[in-house]
Image (cartoon, grey):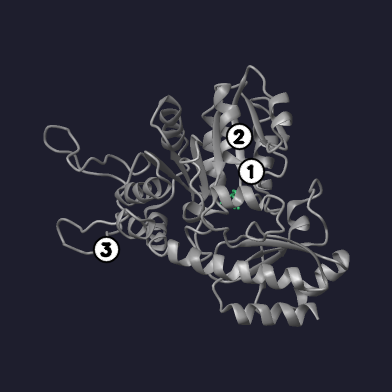
Amino acid sequence: MHIETIAIHAGNHVDETSKAVIQPIILSTTFERAVDGTYPGGYIYSRSSNPNRTLLENVLAKLEGGSDAAAFSSGNAAGMSVFQSLPPGTHVIAPDDMYHGLRNQLKLLFAGILTFDFIDVNDSQVLMDHLRPETGLIWIETPSNPLLKITDIKQVVKIAHQNGIKVACDNTFATPVCQQPLALGADLVMHSSTKYFGGHSDLMGGALITKVKGDWWLKIRQVQEYGGAIPSPLDCYYLARSIKTLPYRIRGHVHNAQLLAEFLEKHPKVESVMYPGLPSHPQHDIAKAQMTSFGGMLSFCLKGGREEANRVINQLKLFTRATSLGGVESLIEHRATVEGPDTKTPFNLLRVSVGLEHIDDLVEDLAQALA
Ligand SMILES: *Cc1c(COP(=O)(O)O)cnc(C)c1O
């Protein structure tokens, strides 16, 4: 089945008693037992599982081509569950430009429990030099935030699997519409569903999708159930609802991002544009090989430095100055000041979450702000 069809049908079912076409929201925290003590509906208690979460997990698994999915209360809770599922002492390799919230999670919450190196995972030699007997996981994120660097998924998977190491991929920027890491060999996919899955900047969520249901997945399910960082039935409902339009929303985001990137690249006040859909992107060929389209995120650097970046961002009318991404409205942010003092992000860089407004209006707004 095609992804448009999966998005609409895999997270929904016609209710058996009322015949409602859209799945009802089941808020009950507890479920009645039969006289023989069994649970005829298959549900016991909502921390363990809930009908709305089951439907959401079903559509998430199908979208990424996985065998199962687990939904969480945020993207960071999903990441946390991966790291908590690893035996203490495991060595984790992560990208040097890993999403700063997860980098801080590792540094602040897992010091003394796991060991980790933040490196350029795309450099095979560097990657191999950092492998240790206790390395259990290589974490990748592609395209990366905010530099839109591309990691060659197949290449990392090859090195990892030759050494008995698992690969998890943060697929938040790409979404399964643009890129399917499990098909490229990754073992696990992670999402902040706060972003494109939610798509309207009004809910938080996270997801993990697994290729196989082995021992590692069982452990992750235990962290989900006993850790309890689960989404509410309402959040699950809203997410499954938003996902129905995900493939069409992504088409719009990609269309606008490509045209905006081309406009910015030609502008005399712009120093550089980072968008994997541009032939000038240093890893455009890898992006073309592993992505079906290039996503809705781009960054650009201004010739005038930090002051010029501030001037432009304050001159814009349609782009809202805010962090986060993946909503229908365009957002722009000065990334270095969000990431904090240890950031490696250039101070003249602005990150754009390209929304679904008409492209001519977006270009016009940027043109007047840059002028
Ligand atoms: C936002 C984000 C996260 C964290 O997700 P939350 O929902 O904010 O917890 C992780 N990775 C990437 C790439 C993100 O953009």
Residue assigned mark 3: 22
x then y, percent, for residue 278: 67, 61
x then y, percent, for residue 303: 86, 67
- In screen coordinates, is 213 left or right of 186? left
The image quarter in which residue 221 lies: top left
**Alpha carbon of mark 3 to alpha carbon of mark 1: how far?**
39 Å
Residue assigned mark 1: 151
- Camera-side residue: 98 or 22? 98
Q: Is mark 2 within 8 Å of ligand 1?
A: no
x then y, percent, for residue 141: 61, 44
x then y, percent, for residue 29: 32, 47
Residue assigned mark 2: 156
Which residue is depicted at the point 55% across and 33% down? Answer: 167
Residue kind at label 1, given as amino acid type: Thr
Q: Residue furthest top?
A: 133
Report the quarter where the C terminus lies.
bottom right
Residue 293 in view in this figure: yes
- Camera-side residue: 304 or 37? 304
Secondary structure under tag 2 reads helix
